[in-house]
Image (cartoon, helix red, strand yellow):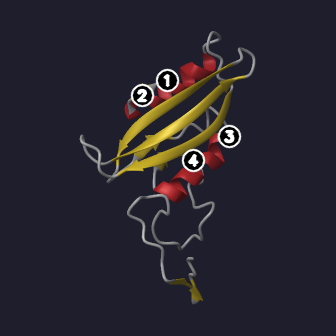
Amino acid sequence: MVVKAEAWAAVAGLCRDDSRLGFDLLSCITGVDYPEREDGAEIEVIYNLDSIANHHELTVKVKLPRDDPRIASVEEIWRTADWHERETYDLLGVVFEGHHNLVRILCAEDWVGHPLRKDYEPPDSFHGIKNVIY
């Protein structure tokens, strides 16, 4: 299902709280960079939701503008969003508004850029350590 960014927080709450849906587990958040889409460059944030009790799953996509990808954090709805949002922020540059500690989780705090962006250029070195790519 595709959800507009401005509706995502309300939809996420409904997905968790409606007993017919009961999506009690956020198992993954990831993102995909689409710098050359016909309608303009965008990043899709993809949420994988699971209902343990109801035995069903749902994939939700939210499309964001690539030049300023911002979306409401859902860590207060699903606690597992904490690290997933940090990873997506670190690797793609998506800002999860309202996140309690949105800092890098995989790259060093002073790393420049977001490695999963398609136009990312890895540095030749980092703090004097040569980057060797085979």
Q: Neighbour class for label 2 at 10 Å: few (<14), some, many (≥20)?
A: some
104 to the left or right of 79 = left
The answer to whether residue 16 of the structure is visible from this angle is: yes
Do the CB atoms of the residues marked 2 and 1 lie less than 8 Å apart?
Answer: yes
**Circle nearer the viewer, 2 or 1:** 2
Q: Position of residue 15 (x, y in %)?
A: 57, 21
Give the mark nearest the N terminus, 2 or 1.
2
Judged from the image, the secondary structure of the residue bearing numbered disc 1 is helix
Frontmost residue, 28 versus 71: 28
Looking at the rendered structure, the kind of residue marked 2 is Val
Q: Earlier in the sequence, mark 3 or mark 4?
A: 3
Measured Cα–Cα span from mark 2 to mark 4: 17 Å
Q: CA distance from mark 2 to mark 3?
A: 20 Å
**Reading the chain from its start, which is encountered first: label 2 or label 3?**
2
Horizontally, is 7 left or right of 102 in the view?
Answer: left
Label drawn at residue 80: 3
> Circle 3 — which element?
loop
Q: Which residue carries the number 2 mark?
A: 3
